[in-house]
Amino acid sequence: MKNTSTILALLVGTCAFAQMKFPAVSSHAEIEQKVGLTEFEIEYNRPNINNREVFGKLVPNGEVWRTGANENTVIKFDQPIKVNGKELAAGEYSLYTIPNQKSWDVIFYKDAKNWGNPQEWKESNIALKVNSPATKTKGVKLETFEIRFTNVQQDKADLVLAWDDVSVVVKLETNTKQAVLDMIKSQLNENSPARDFYNSANYYYTNKLDRAQALKWINKAIAKDAKAPSYFVELKEKLEKEKY
């Protein structure tokens, strides 16, 4: 009985000192977005206005901001991209910004393990800095800070930073076209299934590339599949009729 009582006492004591959990003041968010063949991930914390004056006061103009709350905002992508027309290697970066009234500097920083801003800011850690216009959203105020992707296409997308009545758009471009062309060149062969020949022909047709080559591939696809779907034949007809 003595041993049992001791164990129970220890358990009660342990429970008494268990850490309590409270909701975060700024909610945590994760975003995943595929642009063409490039995978993007963003992890950040979302502060609220809470009746405060945001830009120029809570977030001072001309100073480095963590672009969110708590830990630094982190962005990852698995293939090289262009940001506002400038090249940036694939990898993981902190996304820092320097807000101003008319435009923001957007900084991709190599050290992605900070609570907020780095204790020591190193210019050598700046992988890329670009500038984007800051637009006022008339009559609309966003209570919670938001990062989102819009206008997502096969080879580009807009990365939007929005809070209060300010919106900043960063232009992203991926290497989708070259990646697809390289894949076709290295992988498409006589043993490839009909579907691969169809997809290759359709990609060429959609992007207005070598029509003669696309015709060869769609003919190959139809020849390989005795039960080829009707859209195989439809693509062949389009390639034969349309000139580009």
Image (cartoon, rainbow, N blue to C red):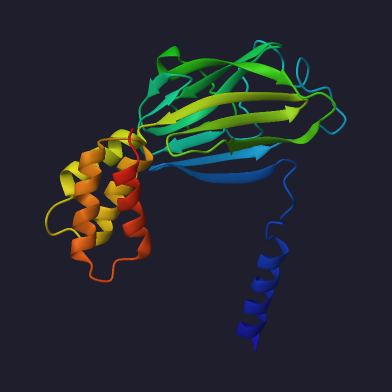
* Camera-nearest residue between 172 and 55: 172
Image position, residue 200 (x, y; %): 27, 48
| Residue 124 can be seen, yes or no | yes
| Residue name at image x 76 percent, y 14 percent | 56
Q: Which residue is pictured at 53% across the width and 39% down the height?
A: 42
Judge from the rendering whether residue 196 lies leftward or rightward of residue 125; answer left or right. Answer: left
| Image position of 173 (left or right of 17) | left
- The one of 153 and 142 positioned closer to us in this rendering: 153
Residue 115 seen in render: no
* 165 vs 50: above or below: above
Residue occupying the point 49% across, 38% down: 153
Residue 112 place in picture, x, y as percent? 47, 32
Q: Position of residue 29 (x, y in %)?
A: 62, 45
Of residues 29 and 199, the one nearer the viewer is 199
Quadrant location, the N terminus: bottom right
The residue sitting at the left extreme is 190
**Screen quadrant of the C terminus:** top left
| Left or right: where 104 falls relative to 32 | right
User: Residue 55 placed where, x, y %?
Assistant: 75, 19
